[in-house]
Amino acid sequence: MNTAAHIETAGAPLSRAKAAMILLHGRGATAEGMLDLAEVFAQPDMAYLAPQAPGRTWYPHSFLAPIAQNEPHLSRALAQVGALVEDLGRKGFGPEKIVLLGFSQGGCLALEYAARNAQRYGAVIGLSSGLIGPEGTPRTYGGSLAGTRVVLGCSDVDAHIPVGRVHESARVLSALGGDVIKRIYPGMGHTINDDEISQVRAALSGVLHPEFSNNPRDVH
């Protein structure tokens, strides 16, 4: 399986960065567009890496479709994320110094990767997203997130992400040992808001400066 992907980068060079963030774009979007968030997050010691999905989509169907319908694209996308995590590891960034962040389809990919490869990450952030698969998908993941901060943010009326899937994802990731912070925003569109940006900044600060980290709790 070819896992090579074009990677856009921003922020601190890996040679001096204290941590790295992998940003996964949504359907129809671009890696370059995701790097606009690097300026918003404003963390000078963070390296940002955004892989580009082939044809601007990680998998062809809804994240709620039967998993087999999204294969082999889903497995290829997960392998691309895994290859990037492994490459960062070879460059001195253990998983505890890697942040996985995605929006929409990219957020679903980030959460699914973290669940299938549970370990102590710097943080896992899924914006307008949820774990992949139809209702009733067995969530028999192994490993442990070991206290990883997990940030989930979504509208209660998102046309693409049922709020019930966000709640389910929070439960599953919490059971895997994630320290889950869930934000549900009444009436918000399929977008990213200022409170989510604040949550991400806090998560990044916790990775870069763990002695000063805080831990706001769920708001439903």
Image: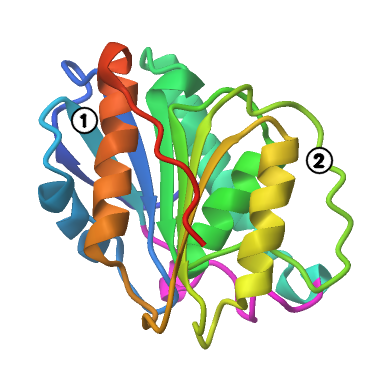
Instruction: Determine the secondary structure under disc 1.
Output: strand
Residue at x 23%, y 32% (from the top left corner): 47
Q: Which residues are magenta?
A: 52-66
Tell me residue 157's x, y (percent): 51, 84
Q: Amino acid at mark 2?
A: Tyr
Residue at x 75%, y 79% (from the top left corner): 65
Q: Badge 2 is on which residue?
A: 141
Q: Is residue 204 magenta?
A: no
Q: Is residue 59 magenta?
A: yes
Of the residues under marks 1 and 2, which one precedes in the sequence?
1
Q: Residues within 10 Å of mark 1 (few under 14, many from 20)?
A: many
Q: Amino acid at mark 1?
A: Met
Magenta span main SS: loop
Q: Badge 1 is on which residue?
A: 46
Residue at x 49%, y 23% (from the top left corner): 95
Tell me residue 24's x, y (percent): 41, 56
Tell me residue 13's x, y (percent): 15, 27
Tell me residue 158's x, y (percent): 49, 82
Residue 75 seen in this snapshot: no
